[in-house]
Image: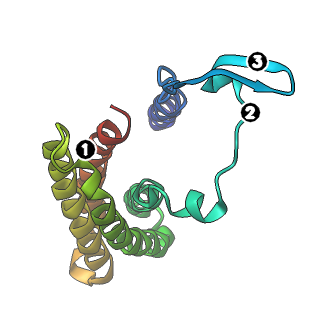
């Protein structure tokens, strides 16, 4: 019973943190000055971006803009899922293969996240956030390497029983890297 209570508490805390993540994050508004532009006898002196209808960007632009920010969620989710599955596999060994597959998918996506991050890195060069981008990159590389090590732990029989422990290392690195990535994107 105590385990179920602890698991429920962790799920509630995790859910609350996700739901409140962007609570205080307000989009920045840009005021568009259209200095008394006349359109069909309608005079518009200034409008806030919030009052204008949303315009969908071109699909190609929407898909590939900030690609790292889109890809990076996959190695995080697969890595955390793998860690959880390896922990549960101590009790239910049939979950080990699912943990191994999750770790492998996370490691593959981590490589994609690295290259997409390299493509986005230029935006932070010679800015006050340059040091933060470099730190985030180093932690991201460590997380990617740790995911590949987790795959190795899952495959090699003598290390299988320690995969859950290495999964905790992956979890720690992913959470730290995510924190710094969030500061880069939103802070």
Q: Secondary structure at mark 2?
A: loop
Give the mark nearer the N terminus: 1 vs 3.
Answer: 3
Q: Secondary structure at mark 1?
A: helix
Give the number of callouts: 3
Question: Does residue 140 show up?
Answer: yes
The residues bearing labels 1 and 2 have C-alpha atoms spaced at a distance of 37 Å
Q: Which residue is mark 1?
A: 176
Residue 108 picture location, percent across and down: 39, 75
Residue 102 picture location, percent across and down: 45, 69
The residues bearing labels 3 and 2 have C-alpha atoms spaced at a distance of 18 Å
Give the mark nearer the N terminus: 1 vs 2.
Answer: 2
Residue at 30%, 59% in the rendered image:
167
Residue 159 picture location, percent across and down: 22, 75
Observer-side mark, 1 or 3, equals 3
Specify few, some or many for label 3: CA neighbours under 10 Å numbering under 14, 14-19, or 20 or more: few
Residue 32 picture location, percent across and down: 57, 25
Residue at 21%, 49% in the rendered image:
133
Q: Could you tell whether 64 is left or right of 160 in the image? A: right
Question: Does residue 162 show up?
Answer: no
């Amino acid at each position: 019973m105590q385990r179920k209570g602890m698991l429920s508490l962790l799920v509630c805390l995790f859910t609350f943190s996700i739901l409140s993540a962007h609570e205080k994050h307000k989009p920045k508004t840009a005021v568009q000055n259209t200095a008394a532009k006349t359109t069909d006898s309608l005079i518009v002196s200034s409008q806030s971006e919030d009052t204008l209808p949303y315009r969908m960007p071109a699909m190609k632009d929407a898909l590939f803009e900030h690609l790292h920010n889109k890809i990076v969620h996959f190695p995080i989710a697969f890595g955390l899922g793998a860690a959880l599955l390896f922990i549960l596999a101590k009790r239910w060994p049939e979950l080990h293969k699912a943990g191994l597959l999750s770790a492998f998918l996370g490691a593959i996506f981590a490589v994609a996240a690295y290259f997409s991050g390299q493509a986005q890195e230029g935006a932070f060069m010679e800015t006050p956030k340059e040091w933060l981008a470099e730190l985030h990159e180093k932690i991201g590389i460590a997380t990617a390497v740790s995911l590949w090590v987790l795959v190795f732990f899952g495959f090699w029989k003598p290390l299988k029983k320690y995969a859950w422990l290495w999964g905790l290392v992956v979890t720690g690195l992913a959470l730290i890297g995510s924190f710094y990535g969030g500061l880069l994107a939103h802070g």
